[in-house]
Image (cartoon, grey):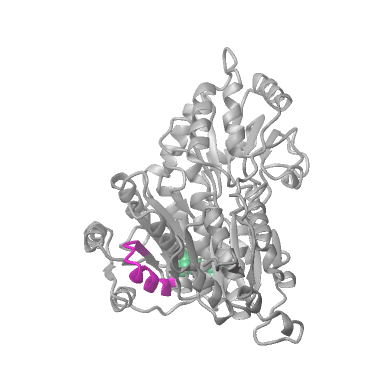
Amino acid sequence: MRANDGSRTAAEVLIDQLVIHGARHVFCVPGESYIAALDAMVDRPLEVTVCRQEGGACIMAEATGKLTGRPGICFVTRGPGATNASSGLHIAQQDSTPLILFVGQIAREYREREAFQELDYRAVFGSIAKWVTEIDDPARVPEIISRAFHVATSGRPGPVVIALPEDMLVERVVATDAPACEPVETSPGPADMRRLQMLLNEAQRPIALLGGSRWSNSACAAMQHFAERFLLPVATTFRRAHLFDASHPCYAGDLGIGPNPKLLARVKDADLVMLIGGRLGEMPSQSYTLFDIPGPRQTLVHVHPGAEELGRVYSPALAINATPSAFAAALEGLARPEKVAWSAATPAAHAEFIEWTAKPPQVPGAVNLGEIIAGLRDTLPAETIICNGAGNFSIWVHRFWRYRHYASQLAPIAGSMGYGVPAAIAAKRLMPERTVIAFAGDGDFLMTGQELATAMQYELPIIIVIADNGMYGTIRMHQERHYPARVIGTELKNPDFAALARAYGAFGALVEKTADFTAAFDAALASGKPAVIHLKVNPQAITPATTIDAIRKAALAAQA
Ligand SMILES: Cc1ncc(C[n+]2csc(CCOP(=O)(O)OP(=O)(O)O)c2C)c(N)n1
Ligand SMILES: [Mg+2]
């Protein structure tokens, strides 16, 4: 509160800046180091979500950044809190998500003595965050918070870490608020678009690949309109399938783990690739095999909001430093050639996608995760938000769910286990009207599953579907490939997940047959509570294409 002399505590100035810059949600685990900042949130228009572990809190903030395009806000305490939160920072970095992590810090006068829980944040987070700073002077709070919002959202978005010495937070200061931050939009120049027009005029087999962040509903709509006008096949990169409507006749599928071989062939054979927004990292590039480095055979047009990403791995024929939103809007100015050479290729690409995702194959065991997901996609609203962490279960989710809406997919490009449950909690907190489902593996769930308590506390009826195969399946798969029949460190003895859910006060159901899933799902929805559906999945069903036994057999044969 402002005193008569117009002064506020630094903590109050800080929280006022968050509100000015448009933050509406804070995810936190409290610590004595920043209780002044917590106190300043009382009676401010901020929804505070108190979590059970900082890893979950920071993922919730990251998911908020993904959903809104504005920095997710997380508050944690000194050393132990900050290090717990670091997985969320790494996700924000690899996923190009705007995020601001506030961490408590020891009093300024104790610095450098290794005081209680002291951490040198600049040293520890220097290579993860876009910017790490510590606020020493309360008068500079508006300046530093303004810069944090600009850094987190501009160019290639990413995480910012701000340390808050506890004695600084309670100092009173007369400070002027900053104006609200608007992320900088970089637009393509007329020469860029002329060159692109020429490349499109000459192309025989073009394809667009969409990825990265800084998209929006309207950018996706503009991209779709361009695809329609040019009859252009459009694919998405790893875990960015929500950028293009899967039911659209121009959609060709996604370049994820275990992608459609026909899509891979199409991208390899393309003469013009428009990579828009993404970086084409290790996963979508299929371990850097799709394009030659540094000079791809395909004519590569790379559009990215961060100038430093252009030419970083692939040297493009045409590099355009623009946000996907500004670029998609500029596509309106391109003229479609009289006759396009690829008019038969686009419907063929879409037909290949439909065929690839239509019917899940039979797998060992009584529960077929593919059939469950295909069943849900045919009944749930297109706006349903689908969340997941990491593990082989996610291969079925990405293959058999068809994402039709921007921001309906919350999945870590960084491949961090434990992502799905906290992401679902954030999504439901922000968008209570949406159906939100988190798919998790048995290993994946128990990394952050205690946030079920947070879902209960805020009455967030998310549905968590746990695919329990009794193992860290992905690693077991790699183990069998490289060290067949030498199983170690990958088996899991699990709790009764449905009973665990009920102990939290949530809905819990066990499903041991595919046919029983629908009734359990309907009951979960009807309960109006956070829900866990525990699927007993056969460990042999390791991917849609193969089994553990088959992988082992092939590896042993190769050794013989
Ligand atoms: C935080 C984190 N720790 C470890 C890993 C390595 N890892 C990737 S997948 C995986 C196993 C996932 O097991 P589970 O969730 O049960 O899914 P499954 O593969 O069995 O379907 C592990 C340990 C990771 N990606 N992230
Ligand atoms: Mg598992």
Locate residue 476, reporting x and y percent: 53, 69
Residue 110 quadrant: bottom right
Q: Is residue 481 visible?
A: no
Residue visible at 49% across and 45% down? 241
360 is within the stretch colored magenta: no
In the rendered view of the protein, which quadrant contains the C terminus?
A: bottom right
Locate residue 159, reporting x and y percent: 63, 59
Residue visible at 45% across and 74% down? 446
Vertical order, 362 against 122 (above or below)? above
Which of the two residues, 491 or 511, is positioned nearer the viewer here?
A: 511
Which of the two residues, 513 or 209, is positioned nearer the viewer here?
A: 209
Q: Is residue 449 visible?
A: yes
Total marks placed: 0
Locate residue 311, reporting x and y percent: 76, 43
Locate residue 3, reporting x and y percent: 55, 68
Vertical order, 162 against 112 (above or below)? above
Residue 185 quadrant: top right
- Residue furthest top in the image: 338
- Residue furthest front in the image: 4
With 119 as the anchor, is 487 left or right in this view? Answer: left
Vertical order, 470 against 305 (above or below)? below
Magenta residues, start to end? 449-465
464 is within the stretch colored magenta: yes
Which of the two residues, 446 or 285, is positioned nearer the viewer here?
A: 446
